[in-house]
Image: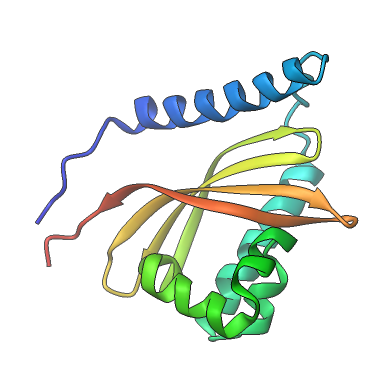
Amino acid sequence: MQMQKLTRNGLLAGVLATVIAIWGGLAWAAGGEVDEQPLETPVIEEVQAVIESQLLAFQTSDGPGAFYHAAPSIQGAFGDSKNFMAMVKRGYRVIYDNRRWTFEDSRINGDNAAQIVLVEDATGQQVRAVYFLGRMQGRWQITGVQQIETISTGA
């Protein structure tokens, strides 16, 4: 069964506009201006390496490896890697059972990043998700993931 989907460019633009608006509001509330950094290749590569490492940990059921990349707030909410993995398996099945992924659009704003990733599982089921990351304790950590589109294979 094929789900109706928004046009890809419209969907991506809307999600990223929302992310930028939230960051802009936070900067305004703090009395500053939005200082969006240009997409510097090394920073984007760092962000993508964290996401890739977590996706690889899901492939091998490496709970501690996947949990390591979660921000302290997420770790605190789930307590341990076993609970975290159960939540991901239940709520983010395609991401948990991933077989391949493609990095799409990225945004970096200081110590915050948003990366859109198209993830596919072994059955061909795909989800497009936005990974949110923050630089904390000297490294990029995943602060949240929002699935924004599911693409069914019809199988």
Q: Is residue 59 above or below residue 93?
A: below
Q: Position of residue 71 (x, y in %)?
A: 71, 60
Q: Going by the image, does 102 lie left or right of 112? A: left
Q: Position of residue 138 (x, y in %)?
A: 90, 55
State the residue lying farthest toward the right. 138
Query: What is the quadrant of residue 70 in the picture?
Result: bottom right
Q: Residue 1 placed where, x, y %? A: 9, 56
- 67 relative position to 7: left or right: right
Q: Quadrant of residue 20?
A: top right
- In the displayed structure, would residue 79 be above or below residue 149? below
Q: Position of residue 34 (x, y in %)?
A: 75, 17
Horizontal side of 32 relative to 13 (left or right) equals right
Number of dots carrying numbers: 0
What residue appears at the point 79 percent right and 13 percent down from the top-left corner? 33
At 70% from the left and 66% from the top, the residue drawn is 69
Image quarter hosting the C terminus: bottom left
Give the answer, above or below, for where 75 lies relative to 101: below
Confirm whether residue 58 shows in the render.
Answer: no
Q: Residue at x 43, y 71 (%)?
A: 98
Residue beneath the point at 67% across and 27% down = 23
* Any part of residue 138 in sight: yes
